[in-house]
Image: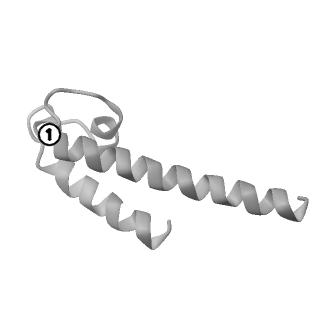
Amino acid sequence: MAKSCKGLAVELVKCLSESDCVKVEKKSFRECAKEKSPCIPSECVGLRETYFNCKRGQVDMRARIRGNKGY
């Protein structure tokens, strides 16, 4: 994982760990990150979208590099 996305991942886990989804409903971070529940604060939703966009951007860059080299 690139350093730029790693920081977002840490912030997302920290945010979700303080949410009712993890504390009250006893779900895993992964489960809470995937669902769109009202018990997840809007701050966590924003971090989730930013993190997913970061990861998506990394995948896109790899595809472009491979495409240019003829792999």
- In the displayed structure, would residue 54 be above or below residue 25? below
- Reading the image, the residue beneath label 1 is 41
Is residue 23 rendered to the left or right of residue 10? left
Q: Residue at x 50, y 65 (%)?
A: 1
**Corner quadrant of residue 7:** bottom left
Instruction: Please provide percent x and percent y for residue 56.
Output: 54, 49
Is residue 58 rendered to the left or right of residue 69? left
At label 1, the amino acid type is Pro
Which image quarter is the C terminus in?
A: bottom right
Is residue 12 rendered to the left or right of residue 56? left
Q: Residue at x 17, y 40 (%)?
A: 42
**Direction bottom: furthest residue:** 3
Is residue 33 rendered to the left or right of residue 65? left
Instruction: Please provide percent x and percent y for residue 40.
Output: 17, 36
Q: Residue at x 23, y 36 (%)?
A: 27
Model colouring: one colour
